[in-house]
Image (tube, rainbow, N blue to C red):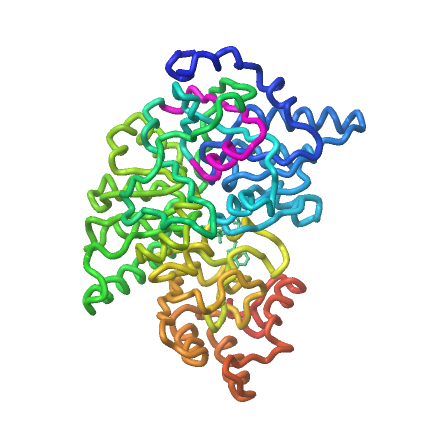
């Protein structure tokens, strides 16, 4: 292994096989692992741990842990650990079908948490202490500092607070990633100083995670790549959503509320948010900046199109072709990129200060602008709230996007009442589907409903939603509802497989 990957020579004899490092983790422990939206996760130790759990359970021995990460893991690690029944508790985000199944079956206790908050809970002993932190690194500095790879997530605080640290040095992660990270740890409350990030470009911390080298109990050398992002390319619906949003932003500029540089942009995870960001390529906007969480393909497409000047995030998650294009040229992008701890990328103080345009995705929203981003049918976890709440509550403009229908039209994403609330009407300014855009700002609930019905709902469901609203309004109320009927669409979907009323099904 190149010596410059472990510059503190006294640590070089701590290199061990993954199985030996994984043996430091015992039943009942709280483990903090690097990894944020399939980027920069520790890879070999969790895999070895899942294998150990399978073997232990076959012998009738217990091995279950609480696993805390930045966000979701790649390389099917959440799947392997879930299927090995290793996870008793999982915090704060995931996006894996096998783990989702274990969560919805009640086997894994999933704590779905705002991504900015986890480390605050650790610092104040509401959670923890962390027994072992497992952190993927590009290398270790001469002072023992850990240089993260393609994500920072919660890694810094995990390593600083853990009793023991295992470092995975990944030789496939380019050494040139060094210098990309900005590790800033806020001071203790209640006497915390303002966090000095005043523009997306602000560098306020260290380029490595400072830890006591004595705590580094094992080093594992790995060569496994990050998983490719699984987002799909833009399609006609997501292009239409982007078109509506661009037209709206142009109008805001015309009204003098912003310039063509807009405000710093945040874009959520997934196919729809990534596709919407592509809409900026053909837009009149320029000299854009991002203060976001996950930097997806669209960030680099916007750099290459000359639209984007700077991007701050907590991870870089790319498709395979984009990864192959970007990583060999990472030094070309480095001066325009920063990766920060997720409590800083998602910090309410900074989001409010910078006046972000936050663009996140809803599974469904209702007549009045309440948004459900997490629960299918009101009960079954999809991925988690992630950072969407951090941004939605504090953004200058909080935008939620979604296609107006799902599952071929069997589900409407615009419903009388959401079956679970992640973002209340108070945190939602703009709703966009491929049908159109609803600007809810400064509108009372009855006005909001009319704008949503006119602009967002799919034609298949428009009459039914309008009929519900008119009958609800006849009953009165500031936020009219027919309480006994408000979730009838969800009940019909569960019992009949579709939200469509029977008479409309023939037309569909
Ligand atoms: N009811 C039930 N399921 C729905 C639905 C609805 N109203 N709308 C969409 N879905 C399903 C889709 O059918 C699809 O299912 P599939 O995986 O079985 O094909 C799935 O949800 C994902 O939808 P898709 O249209 O591909 O959107 P996406 O990839 O953009 O993901 C979210 C959308 C909401 C799941 C995703 O953005 C998310 O997890 N958000 C919450 C966290 C977050 O916003 N983080 C960002 C903060 S920076």
- The x, y position of residue 392, in whole percent, is 42, 59
Q: Is residue 153 above or below residue 374?
A: above
Q: Nearer the viewer, residue 420 or 424?
A: 424
Q: Residue 155 colored magenta?
A: yes
| Residue at figure coordinates x 39%, y 29% from the top left | 208
| Residue at figure coordinates x 33%, y 32% from the top left | 180
Quadrant of the image occupied by residue 97: top right
| Residue at figure coordinates x 47%, y 56% from the top left | 389
Q: Residue 359 colored magenta?
A: no
Is residue 408 at least partly visible in the picture?
no
| Residue at figure coordinates x 49%, y 37% from the top left | 157
Q: Is residue 62 left or right of residue 228?
A: right
Determine the residue located farthest toward the right in the rendered image: 60
- The x, y position of residue 58, in whole percent, is 77, 26
Q: Nearer the viewer, residue 92 or 242?
A: 92
Q: Is residue 92 above or below residue 404?
A: above
Is residue 181 at least partly visible in the picture?
yes
- The x, y position of residue 87, in whole percent, is 66, 38
Magenta stretch bounds: 152-174
Quadrant of the image occupied by residue 47: top right
| Image quadrant where one finds the N terminus | top left
Q: Is residue 423 left or right of residue 494?
A: left
């Amino acid at each position: 292994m190149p010596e410059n990957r472990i510059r503190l020579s006294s640590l070089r004899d701590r290199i061990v096989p993954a199985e030996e490092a994984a043996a430091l983790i015992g039943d009942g422990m709280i483990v903090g692992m690097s990894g944020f939206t399939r980027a920069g996760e520790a890879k070999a130790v969790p895999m070895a741990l899942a294998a150990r759990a399978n073997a232990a359970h076959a012998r009738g021995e217990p091995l279950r842990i609480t696993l805390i990460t930045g966000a979701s893991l790649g390389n099917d690690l959440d799947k392997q650990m879930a299927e090995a029944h290793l996870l008793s508790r999982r915090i704060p985000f995931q996006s894996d079908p096998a783990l989702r199944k274990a969560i919805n079956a009640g086997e894994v206790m999933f704590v779905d948490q705002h991504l900015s908050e986890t480390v605050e809970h650790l610092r104040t002993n509401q959670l923890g202490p962390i027994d072992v932190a497992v952190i993927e690194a590009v290398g270790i500095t001469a002072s023992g500092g850990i240089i993260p790879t393609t994500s920072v997530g919660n890694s810094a605080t995990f390593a600083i607070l853990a009793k023991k640290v295992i470092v995975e040095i990944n030789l496939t992660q380019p050494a040139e990633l060094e210098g990309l990270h900005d590790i800033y740890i806020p001071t203790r409350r209640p006497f915390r100083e303002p966090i000095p990030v005043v523009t997306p470009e602000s560098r306020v911390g260290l380029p490595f995670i400072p830890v006591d080298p004595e705590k580094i109990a094992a080093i594992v050398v790995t060569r496994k790549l990050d998983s490719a992002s699984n987002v799909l390319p833009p399609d006609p619906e997501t292009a239409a959503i982007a078109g509506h949003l661009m037209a709206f932003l142009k109008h805001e500029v015309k009204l003098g509320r912003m310039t063509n540089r807009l405000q710093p942009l945040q874009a959520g995870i997934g196919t729809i948010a990534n596709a919407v960001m592509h809409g900026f390529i053909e837009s009149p906007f320029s000299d854009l900046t991002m203060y976001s969480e996950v930097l997806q393909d669209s960030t680099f497409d916007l750099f290459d199109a000359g639209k984007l000047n700077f991007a701050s995030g907590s991870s870089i998650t790319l498709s395979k072709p984009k990864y192959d294009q970007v990583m060999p040229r990472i030094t070309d992008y480095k001066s325009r990129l920063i990766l920060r701890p997720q409590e800083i990328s998602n910090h309410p103080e900074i989001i409010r200060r910078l006046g972000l345009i936050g663009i996140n995705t809803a599974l469904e929203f209702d007549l009045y602008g309440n948004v459900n981003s997490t629960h299918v049918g009101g009960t079954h976890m999809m991925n988690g709230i992630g950072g969407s709440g951090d941004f939605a509550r504090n953004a200058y403009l909080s935008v939620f996007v979604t296609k107006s229908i799902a599952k071929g039209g069997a589900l409407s994403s615009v419903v009388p009442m959401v079956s679970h609330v992640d973002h209340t009407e108070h945190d939602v300014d703009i709703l966009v589907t491929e049908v159109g855009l609803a600007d809810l700002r400064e509108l009372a609930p009855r006005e909001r409903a009319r704008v949503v019905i006119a602009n967002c709902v799919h034609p298949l469901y428009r009459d039914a939603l309008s009929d519900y609203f008119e009958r609800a309004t006849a009953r009165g109320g500031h936020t009219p509802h027919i309480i006994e009927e408000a979730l009838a669409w969800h009940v019909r979907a569960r019992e009949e497989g579709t939200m469509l009323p029977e008479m409309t099904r023939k037309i569909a």
